[in-house]
Protein backbone atom coordinates (compact mmCIF):
# COMPACT_ATOMS: atom_id res chain seq x y z
CA UNK A 1 0.00 0.00 0.00
CA UNK A 2 1.36 3.43 -0.94
CA UNK A 3 2.04 6.28 1.41
CA UNK A 4 -0.43 9.19 1.36
CA UNK A 5 0.25 12.92 1.60
CA UNK A 6 -1.79 13.08 4.81
CA UNK A 7 0.55 10.57 6.42
CA UNK A 8 3.64 12.46 5.27
CA UNK A 9 2.19 15.72 6.57
CA UNK A 10 1.46 14.13 9.95
CA UNK A 11 5.00 12.75 10.21
CA UNK A 12 6.69 16.05 9.29
CA UNK A 13 4.37 18.03 11.59
CA UNK A 14 5.20 15.80 14.54
CA UNK A 15 8.91 16.18 13.88
CA UNK A 16 8.67 19.96 13.48
CA UNK A 17 6.50 20.57 16.55
CA UNK A 18 7.98 17.86 18.74
CA UNK A 19 4.70 16.38 19.93
CA UNK A 20 1.49 14.77 18.75
CA UNK A 21 -0.57 17.42 20.50
CA UNK A 22 1.15 20.37 18.82
CA UNK A 23 1.16 18.59 15.44
CA UNK A 24 -2.56 17.89 15.74
CA UNK A 25 -3.28 21.55 16.46
CA UNK A 26 -1.16 22.57 13.47
CA UNK A 27 -2.96 20.16 11.12
CA UNK A 28 -6.43 20.77 12.55
CA UNK A 29 -6.81 17.08 13.52
CA UNK A 30 -7.49 15.17 16.69
CA UNK A 31 -4.54 13.65 18.50
CA UNK A 32 -5.86 10.17 17.76
CA UNK A 33 -6.14 10.94 14.01
CA UNK A 34 -2.55 12.19 13.90
CA UNK A 35 -1.35 9.15 15.85
CA UNK A 36 -3.20 6.79 13.49
CA UNK A 37 -1.70 8.50 10.42
CA UNK A 38 1.78 8.13 11.86
CA UNK A 39 1.10 4.50 12.75
CA UNK A 40 -0.13 3.70 9.23
CA UNK A 41 2.99 5.26 7.75
CA UNK A 42 5.32 3.19 9.91
CA UNK A 43 3.33 0.06 9.12
CA UNK A 44 3.55 0.67 5.37
CA UNK A 45 7.29 1.36 5.59
CA UNK A 46 7.77 -1.54 8.00
CA UNK A 47 10.06 0.53 10.17
CA UNK A 48 9.99 2.77 13.22
CA UNK A 49 10.34 6.44 12.32
CA UNK A 50 9.92 7.99 15.77
CA UNK A 51 11.03 6.65 19.16
CA UNK A 52 8.50 7.62 21.79
CA UNK A 53 9.82 8.45 25.25
CA UNK A 54 7.94 9.73 28.27
CA UNK A 55 9.01 13.30 27.54
CA UNK A 56 9.35 13.58 23.76
CA UNK A 57 9.53 11.96 20.34
CA UNK A 58 12.93 11.30 18.80
CA UNK A 59 13.76 10.43 15.20
CA UNK A 60 15.28 7.03 14.59
CA UNK A 61 18.08 6.76 12.06
CA UNK A 62 15.56 5.49 9.51
CA UNK A 63 13.22 8.32 10.44
CA UNK A 64 15.93 10.90 9.80
CA UNK A 65 16.61 9.46 6.37
CA UNK A 66 12.93 9.29 5.47
CA UNK A 67 12.30 12.84 6.75
CA UNK A 68 14.42 14.35 3.98
CA UNK A 69 12.42 12.48 1.35
CA UNK A 70 9.11 13.42 2.98
CA UNK A 71 10.03 17.11 3.02
CA UNK A 72 11.08 16.97 -0.64
CA UNK A 73 7.78 15.35 -1.66
CA UNK A 74 5.66 17.88 0.25
CA UNK A 75 7.73 20.78 -1.10
CA UNK A 76 7.25 19.44 -4.63
CA UNK A 77 3.47 19.25 -4.16
CA UNK A 78 3.39 22.79 -2.77
CA UNK A 79 5.42 24.05 -5.73
CA UNK A 80 3.10 22.33 -8.20
CA UNK A 81 0.02 23.84 -6.54
CA UNK A 82 1.63 27.29 -6.56
CA UNK A 83 2.50 26.89 -10.24
CA UNK A 84 -1.09 25.94 -11.08
CA UNK A 85 -2.38 28.90 -9.09
CA UNK A 86 0.05 31.17 -10.95
CA UNK A 87 -1.15 29.80 -14.28
CA UNK A 88 -4.73 30.60 -13.34
CA UNK A 89 -3.66 34.19 -12.76
CA UNK A 90 -1.22 34.26 -15.68
CA UNK A 91 -2.10 31.58 -18.27
CA UNK A 92 0.81 29.73 -19.83
CA UNK A 93 1.57 26.67 -21.92
CA UNK A 94 0.71 25.37 -25.38
CA UNK A 95 -2.81 25.98 -26.68
CA UNK A 96 -3.92 24.05 -29.77
CA UNK A 97 -6.71 25.81 -31.66
CA UNK A 98 -8.66 24.36 -34.58
CA UNK A 99 -11.05 26.15 -36.95
CA UNK A 100 -12.29 26.05 -40.52
CA UNK A 101 -9.83 27.81 -42.81
CA UNK A 102 -12.02 30.88 -43.50
CA UNK A 103 -12.74 31.42 -39.80
CA UNK A 104 -9.08 31.00 -38.96
CA UNK A 105 -7.99 33.49 -41.64
CA UNK A 106 -10.67 36.14 -41.29
CA UNK A 107 -11.51 36.00 -37.58
CA UNK A 108 -8.79 34.39 -35.48
CA UNK A 109 -5.58 35.45 -37.23
CA UNK A 110 -6.36 39.20 -36.92
CA UNK A 111 -6.79 38.71 -33.16
CA UNK A 112 -3.50 36.94 -32.51
CA UNK A 113 -1.29 40.00 -32.10
CA UNK A 114 -3.53 41.53 -29.44
CA UNK A 115 -3.88 38.20 -27.65
CA UNK A 116 -0.11 37.68 -27.58
CA UNK A 117 0.40 41.14 -26.09
CA UNK A 118 -2.03 40.32 -23.27
CA UNK A 119 -0.99 36.69 -22.72
CA UNK A 120 2.65 36.35 -23.86
CA UNK A 121 3.25 33.03 -22.09
CA UNK A 122 0.57 31.13 -24.02
CA UNK A 123 2.14 29.23 -26.93
CA UNK A 124 -0.39 29.11 -29.76
CA UNK A 125 -0.66 26.30 -32.30
CA UNK A 126 -3.22 27.12 -35.00
CA UNK A 127 -4.63 24.35 -37.20
CA UNK A 128 -7.15 24.94 -39.98
CA UNK A 129 -9.16 22.52 -42.10
CA UNK A 130 -12.25 22.24 -44.27
CA UNK A 131 -14.15 19.67 -42.21
CA UNK A 132 -14.97 18.59 -38.67
CA UNK A 133 -11.94 17.24 -36.81
CA UNK A 134 -11.80 14.89 -33.83
CA UNK A 135 -10.50 17.00 -30.95
CA UNK A 136 -8.85 14.07 -29.15
CA UNK A 137 -7.30 12.55 -32.27
CA UNK A 138 -5.84 15.92 -33.31
CA UNK A 139 -4.89 16.79 -29.71
CA UNK A 140 -6.96 19.97 -29.94
CA UNK A 141 -7.70 22.07 -26.85
CA UNK A 142 -10.43 24.23 -28.33
CA UNK A 143 -12.13 24.37 -31.74
CA UNK A 144 -14.41 26.95 -33.32
CA UNK A 145 -17.37 25.55 -35.19
CA UNK A 146 -19.92 27.28 -37.40
CA UNK A 147 -23.45 25.90 -37.60
CA UNK A 148 -25.60 23.70 -35.39
CA UNK A 149 -23.58 21.39 -33.12
CA UNK A 150 -24.36 17.67 -33.27
CA UNK A 151 -21.72 16.19 -30.96
CA UNK A 152 -23.24 15.87 -27.47
CA UNK A 153 -19.85 15.01 -25.94
CA UNK A 154 -18.70 18.59 -26.49
CA UNK A 155 -19.08 21.52 -24.20
CA UNK A 156 -19.84 24.68 -26.16
CA UNK A 157 -19.56 28.38 -25.48
CA UNK A 158 -21.51 30.64 -27.79
CA UNK A 159 -19.20 33.13 -29.52
CA UNK A 160 -21.67 34.87 -31.83
CA UNK A 161 -23.75 34.51 -34.96
CA UNK A 162 -22.90 35.25 -38.56
CA UNK A 163 -25.48 36.17 -41.19
CA UNK A 164 -25.47 34.48 -44.61
CA UNK A 165 -25.82 36.58 -47.79
CA UNK A 166 -25.83 36.09 -51.57
CA UNK A 167 -22.98 38.06 -53.11
CA UNK A 168 -21.23 38.83 -56.38
CA UNK A 169 -18.43 41.09 -57.53
CA UNK A 170 -19.14 44.27 -59.53
CA UNK A 171 -17.01 42.79 -62.33
CA UNK A 172 -19.22 39.72 -62.61
CA UNK A 173 -22.42 41.77 -62.57
CA UNK A 174 -21.07 44.13 -65.22
CA UNK A 175 -20.21 41.22 -67.47
CA UNK A 176 -23.31 39.05 -66.87
CA UNK A 177 -25.93 41.49 -65.62
CA UNK A 178 -27.56 41.79 -62.21
CA UNK A 179 -30.41 39.31 -61.59
CA UNK A 180 -33.54 41.12 -60.39
CA UNK A 181 -35.23 38.06 -58.86
CA UNK A 182 -33.96 34.81 -57.29
CA UNK A 183 -35.75 32.94 -60.12
CA UNK A 184 -33.12 34.33 -62.52
CA UNK A 185 -30.25 32.56 -60.73
CA UNK A 186 -30.56 29.61 -63.10
CA UNK A 187 -29.16 31.84 -65.85
CA UNK A 188 -25.96 32.56 -63.89
CA UNK A 189 -22.78 30.86 -62.75
CA UNK A 190 -23.38 29.70 -59.18
CA UNK A 191 -20.52 28.97 -56.80
CA UNK A 192 -21.39 26.37 -54.14
CA UNK A 193 -20.11 23.75 -51.75
CA UNK A 194 -19.34 20.10 -52.44
CA UNK A 195 -20.36 19.33 -48.85
CA UNK A 196 -22.32 19.58 -46.69
CA UNK A 197 -25.23 19.92 -49.09
CA UNK A 198 -27.06 22.15 -46.61
CA UNK A 199 -24.59 24.95 -47.42
CA UNK A 200 -26.18 25.14 -50.86
CA UNK A 201 -29.45 26.28 -49.29
CA UNK A 202 -29.43 30.02 -49.98
CA UNK A 203 -31.45 32.41 -47.77
CA UNK A 204 -33.84 33.54 -50.52
CA UNK A 205 -37.64 33.33 -50.42
CA UNK A 206 -39.26 30.82 -52.75
CA UNK A 207 -42.93 31.16 -53.72
CA UNK A 208 -43.86 28.44 -51.21
CA UNK A 209 -41.98 30.20 -48.42
CA UNK A 210 -38.96 27.88 -48.41
CA UNK A 211 -35.36 28.90 -48.99
CA UNK A 212 -33.63 28.41 -52.33
CA UNK A 213 -31.56 25.27 -52.93
CA UNK A 214 -29.02 25.76 -55.70
CA UNK A 215 -27.07 23.34 -57.84
CA UNK A 216 -23.52 24.73 -58.10
CA UNK A 217 -22.02 25.43 -61.49
CA UNK A 218 -18.62 25.34 -59.80
CA UNK A 219 -18.27 23.58 -56.44
CA UNK A 220 -15.58 23.54 -53.77
CA UNK A 221 -15.13 22.14 -50.27
CA UNK A 222 -13.52 25.42 -49.20
CA UNK A 223 -15.42 28.58 -48.41
CA UNK A 224 -12.25 30.57 -48.90
CA UNK A 225 -11.83 29.13 -52.39
CA UNK A 226 -15.41 30.14 -53.22
CA UNK A 227 -14.74 33.64 -51.86
CA UNK A 228 -11.63 34.02 -54.01
CA UNK A 229 -13.55 32.86 -57.10
CA UNK A 230 -16.33 35.35 -56.36
CA UNK A 231 -13.77 38.15 -55.95
CA UNK A 232 -12.28 37.13 -59.30
CA UNK A 233 -15.68 37.61 -60.94
CA UNK A 234 -16.29 33.93 -61.66
CA UNK A 235 -19.82 33.69 -60.28
CA UNK A 236 -22.42 34.35 -57.61
CA UNK A 237 -21.81 32.96 -54.13
CA UNK A 238 -23.52 32.62 -50.75
CA UNK A 239 -21.16 33.12 -47.82
CA UNK A 240 -21.19 33.97 -44.14
CA UNK A 241 -20.55 37.53 -42.99
CA UNK A 242 -17.49 36.61 -40.91
CA UNK A 243 -15.47 36.03 -44.10
CA UNK A 244 -16.88 38.80 -46.30
CA UNK A 245 -17.03 41.73 -43.87
CA UNK A 246 -14.16 43.66 -45.43
CA UNK A 247 -15.20 42.68 -48.98
CA UNK A 248 -18.63 44.21 -48.43
CA UNK A 249 -17.15 47.30 -46.83
CA UNK A 250 -14.78 47.90 -49.73
CA UNK A 251 -17.39 47.08 -52.38
CA UNK A 252 -15.38 44.14 -53.71
CA UNK A 253 -18.51 42.04 -53.16
CA UNK A 254 -22.07 43.38 -53.17
CA UNK A 255 -25.21 41.80 -51.79
CA UNK A 256 -27.89 40.61 -54.20
CA UNK A 257 -31.63 40.44 -53.44
CA UNK A 258 -31.52 42.36 -50.13
CA UNK A 259 -35.32 42.60 -50.01
CA UNK A 260 -35.86 38.88 -50.69
CA UNK A 261 -33.14 37.67 -48.31
CA UNK A 262 -34.18 35.76 -45.20
CA UNK A 263 -32.25 36.70 -42.06
CA UNK A 264 -30.41 33.39 -41.58
CA UNK A 265 -27.63 33.42 -39.00
CA UNK A 266 -25.14 30.65 -38.38
CA UNK A 267 -24.20 30.08 -34.73
CA UNK A 268 -20.50 30.19 -33.91
CA UNK A 269 -19.30 28.18 -30.90
CA UNK A 270 -16.05 27.45 -29.16
CA UNK A 271 -16.04 23.76 -28.22
CA UNK A 272 -13.99 21.41 -26.07
CA UNK A 273 -14.64 18.04 -24.48
CA UNK A 274 -16.82 17.96 -21.37
CA UNK A 275 -14.41 15.66 -19.56
CA UNK A 276 -11.52 18.05 -20.08
CA UNK A 277 -10.59 20.37 -17.21
CA UNK A 278 -10.98 23.87 -18.56
CA UNK A 279 -7.42 25.19 -18.39
CA UNK A 280 -6.83 28.90 -17.91
CA UNK A 281 -5.20 29.15 -21.32
CA UNK A 282 -8.45 27.92 -22.97
CA UNK A 283 -10.59 30.29 -20.95
CA UNK A 284 -8.43 33.33 -21.64
CA UNK A 285 -8.37 32.67 -25.40
CA UNK A 286 -12.13 32.16 -25.71
CA UNK A 287 -12.80 35.16 -23.45
CA UNK A 288 -10.54 37.29 -25.65
CA UNK A 289 -12.27 36.18 -28.86
CA UNK A 290 -15.71 36.93 -27.38
CA UNK A 291 -14.51 40.32 -26.13
CA UNK A 292 -13.08 41.44 -29.46
CA UNK A 293 -15.97 40.12 -31.54
CA UNK A 294 -18.36 41.99 -29.26
CA UNK A 295 -16.65 45.21 -30.32
CA UNK A 296 -16.31 44.20 -34.00
CA UNK A 297 -19.35 42.22 -35.11
CA UNK A 298 -19.31 40.19 -38.33
CA UNK A 299 -22.07 42.24 -39.95
CA UNK A 300 -20.18 45.53 -39.83
Image (tube, rainbow, N blue to C red):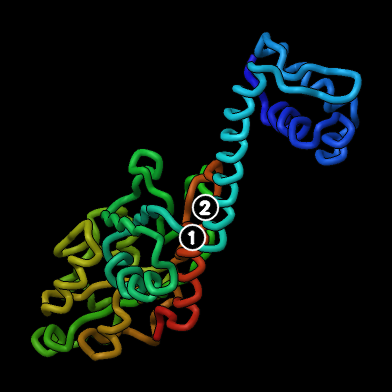
Image coordinates of residue 195 in percent, x first then y, are 27, 53
Q: Residues within 10 Å of mark 1 (few under 14, many from 20)?
A: many
Numbered circles on residues, count: 2
Q: Specify the quadrant of the image occupied by residue 236.
A: bottom left
Q: Are discs 1 and 2 less than 8 Å apart at CB?
A: yes
77 sits left or right of 56 in the view: left
Residue 213: x, y in percent? 32, 64
Residue sitting at the far top = 46
Quarter of the picture containing the C terminus is: bottom left
Earlier residue among tags 1 and 2: 1
103 displayed left or right of 280: left
Q: Secondary structure at mark 1?
A: loop
User: Is residue 193 toward the left or the right of residue 274 in the image?
Assistant: left
Of residues 133 and 256, the one nearer the viewer is 133
Residue 87 placed where, x, y %?
52, 56
Per the model, the C-alpha gap separating discs 1 and 2 is: 8 Å
> Which residue is drawn at the image coordinates 32% and 75% (left, top)?
110
Q: Position of residue 209 (x, y in %)?
A: 45, 71
Residue at 75% from the left image edge and 36% from the top image edge? 16
Q: Which mark is residue 286?
A: none
Task: Name the residue at 55% across, 41% down.
Answer: 275
Residue depicted at x 73% and y 28% = 11
Q: Closer to the camera, 1 or 130?
A: 1
Q: Secondary structure at mark 2?
A: loop
Which residue is the site of mark 1?
A: 91
Answer above or below: position of 259 versus 93: below
The answer to whether one can see residue 204 in this image is no
Which corner quadrant of the image does residue 22 belong to?
A: top right
Residue holding disc 2: 279
Amino acid sequence: MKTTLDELQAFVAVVDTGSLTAASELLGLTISATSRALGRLEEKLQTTLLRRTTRRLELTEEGGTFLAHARAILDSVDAAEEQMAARRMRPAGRLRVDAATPFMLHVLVPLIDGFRVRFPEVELELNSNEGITDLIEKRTDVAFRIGVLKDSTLHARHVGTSRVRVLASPAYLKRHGTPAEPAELGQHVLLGFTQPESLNDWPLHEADGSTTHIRPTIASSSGETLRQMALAGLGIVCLSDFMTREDRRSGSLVQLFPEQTVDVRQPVNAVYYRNTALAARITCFVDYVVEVLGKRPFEG
